[in-house]
Image (tube, rainbow, N blue to C red):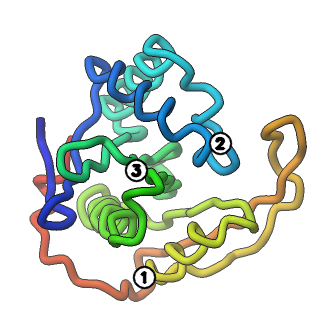
Amino acid sequence: MLSLPLAPDAELTTLEPWQADEFAEHMDRHREHLAPWIPLAHTITDTESARELLQRYADRQANGAGRLLGIRLRGELVGAILFPQFDAATGNCELGVWLAPHAQGHGLITKAAQLMIDWAFEVRGMHRIEWITMPANERSKAVAKRLGMTLDGVMRESYLFGGRRHDAEIWSLLVTDPRPWTLGTDHSKTPS
């Protein structure tokens, strides 16, 4: 399994279909925390649905159209970062994240996002990365700000989630925008 360090006791790792049991258990443990913000908390309900999702992302990754990586703290799967949309032809992609409550406050999401943004821009030649969040998700918006993203606007009642319509804030970072970090990472080693 490939990994990149995020902190002395944390790493960004590959997540593969054979890890479906662990992924399903992670979602079960943190469902209540994730459910208001992450649609996957409603769809990953057992090992089979976890395996299907991980296989779908393995296939997307093989086709250069997406990726899902795990965030581990002291070996425990505590979150993930993913490109749910990744279109190399247009140079546009979307970055999404989640993290278990006990792993928050250590900068793991920010560092993982920095690694994936640098990889998308520098290795894959992407032009625009979007971050989509509910307006009430203050933690998510704070990360977007730390990443130097710009709020493009709000798409009113743009998606159905939990039986009702929700607004979505769209934040973005362009390859030409300044990035408020320097990682000095060899991006050829980003988990693939």
Q: Mark 2: which amino acid?
A: Ala
Q: Is residue 121 visible?
A: no
Q: CA distance from mark 3 to mark 1?
A: 23 Å
C-beta proximity under 8 Å, tags 1 and 2: no
Q: Mark 3: which amino acid?
A: Ile
Which residue lies under the disc numbered 3? 81
Up-down relation of residue 59 to residue 119 (above or below): above
- Closer to the observer: label 3 or label 1? 3
Quadrant position of the C terminus in the picture: top left
Which residue lies under the disc numbered 2? 35
Q: CA distance from mark 2 to mark 3?
A: 16 Å
Q: Nearer the viewer, residue 128 or 185?
A: 185
Give neighbour class at mark 2: few <14, some 14-19, many 20+ (Cα, 10 Å).
some
Query: At 65% across and 30% down in the image, what residue appears?
Result: 42
Q: Mark 1: which amino acid?
A: Thr
The circle drawn on residue 137 is none
Q: CA distance from mark 1 to mark 2?
A: 35 Å
Of callouts 1 and 2, the N-terminal one: 2
Up-down relation of residue 104 to residue 162 (above or below): below
The circle drawn on residue 176 is 1
C-beta proximity under 8 Å, tags 2 and 3: no
